Every structure is written in structure tokens, then in C-alpha cells.
Amino acid sequence: MPSRVAKIVSSLPIPVPGTNVSRFDVSNQEVWQVSEAIEGALPFRLLAKATAFRNVVFLLDGSAKEKNQGVELFLRRDFTERLGGFVSYTLSRADRETPEGSALSTFDRTHVLSVVLGYDFGAGYRMGGRLLVQSGRPYEVACPTPDCSGTTAPPTSFADRATAQRAWEAWTRSQEALRRGDWATYGSEQKRLEDALRSLAESRR
């Protein structure tokens, strides 16, 4: 049965340079989420898992809604093995419905591939790496502030750019976790986002 999460506050409390601010980013929301998963053990001590999910996001003022659905394939081998890690592939679609019509969400990620591997050479030596590849819908920033009243200058210092990048990455990971129904990851990434935004705001005082 779908699970209901009421009154989710807006994800971006202050504008972040380079992001596309929309009514979904600055409005309180209500989310209906359902997911189903199956997993099993494979040879070579591998664990495979397939998850199907669907989320529907309603703005509390009734002005729009967003639908996300997809499947995730996950393959893992414990890091206690000489070669361990995981491979995750997500195929999904995110649509938004507004009074102006239906369209792909600007944060649609049709394909997301994540690979994390580690190899134990023995004698205390280990090497690892990670790869993230994703597709998305290109967009232009039409309204750089929540109220569209002005423009937001891009960060000028290296520290500001790095902080803005951390905020963007945390927000992206939190939205991916929200689509999967991974509430623990969603909460931790939202906390990282909050810390980065607070740091960015303080640097501009």
C-alpha cells in the first residue's frame, strides 16, 4: 500500500547559484510513495536486488504535481572480499503537471549508473574507485530567485563555488533517494544540504 508523507518543506530555503528554482523547490509538498523489491544470492558471493518504485508529489496549494517512477538494479559484493563493491543502475522518468501543461521535470534523470569498487592487495594495501554517470534534461535558468525579483550573482570565490557544488550534489542525491523511498539517505543528504546552504549564506554577509 502507498505510504503518505505530509507537508514536506521546500528543499531550497535560499537560492543557490546555478540551480533552476521552480514552484516545487519553494513550496510545501505532500508525497505518496510505493515500492517493491526482490533480492537473491548469486554465485561468487554476489547479492542482487531489483526495486520498482513510484512517487507522486502534490503541492499543498493544489497548483501542480510531479510523478516519478522507475526501476533500480543493484549488485553488491561485500568489501570483506578481495574484490568488493557494488554496481547500481536506475532507469526512471520524472514528469511535472502544471496549469501550463505536462513536461519532463528539469531534474529528470533517465539513466543513472553508479559503480564503487575496492580491491585488497593484502599487507594492508587497498585501492578503490567510484564512477557516476547520469543523463538528464538540459535547461536554462529562467528565474534565478524564488520570487523572480532579481538576479543572483554566481559565487566569486573558490570557497563559494565549492560550497555551492556540495549543496547541489547533496540535493541531487537526496532527490534520487526520495524516488527510491530511501528515507535514511534522504534525511542525511538533506542535512548536508542544509549545512552547505548555511555556510554559503554566512559567507555572503
Image: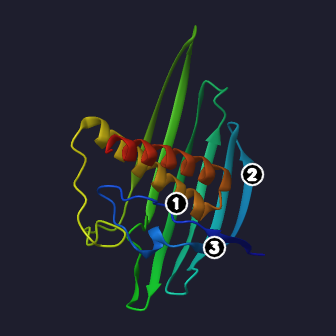
Measure the C-alpha gap from mark 2 to mark 3: 30 Å
**Corner quadrant of residue 69:** bottom right
Give yes or no for contact between labels 2 and 3 (Cβ–Cβ under 8 Å): no
Reading the chain from its start, which is encountered first: label 1 or label 3?
A: 3
Q: Of the numbered discs in the image, which one, if any, rests on residue 60?
A: none
Image height of 192 relative to 149, above or below: above
Measure the C-alpha gap from mark 2 to mark 1: 27 Å
Reading the chain from its start, which is encountered first: label 2 or label 3?
A: 3
Q: Of the numbered discs in the image, which one, if any, rests on residue 31?
A: 3
In the rendered image, residue 49, in percent from the top left (x then y), is placed at: 67, 54
Q: Amino acid at mark 3?
A: Val
Callout 3 secondary element:
strand
- Image quadrant holding the C terminus, namely top left
Measure the C-alpha gap from mark 1 to mark 3: 12 Å
Q: Of the numbered discs in the image, which one, if any, rests on residue 40?
A: 2
**In this figure, which residue is indicated by the disc labeled 1?**
175
Callout 2 secondary element:
strand
Look at 40% across and 51% down and name the residue there. 168
Image height of 184 relative to 35, above or below: above
Q: Amino acid at mark 1?
A: Gln
Callout 1 secondary element:
helix
Image height of 111 relative to 104, above or below: above
Task: Report crowding for label 1: few under 14, some 14 to 19, many 20 or more residues within 10 A (C-alpha).
Answer: some
Evaluate whether residue 6 shows in this view. Answer: yes
In the rendered image, residue 37, in percent from the top left (x then y), is placed at: 71, 62
Look at 29% across and 42% down and name the residue there. 161
Q: Nearer the viewer, residue 22 or 146?
A: 146
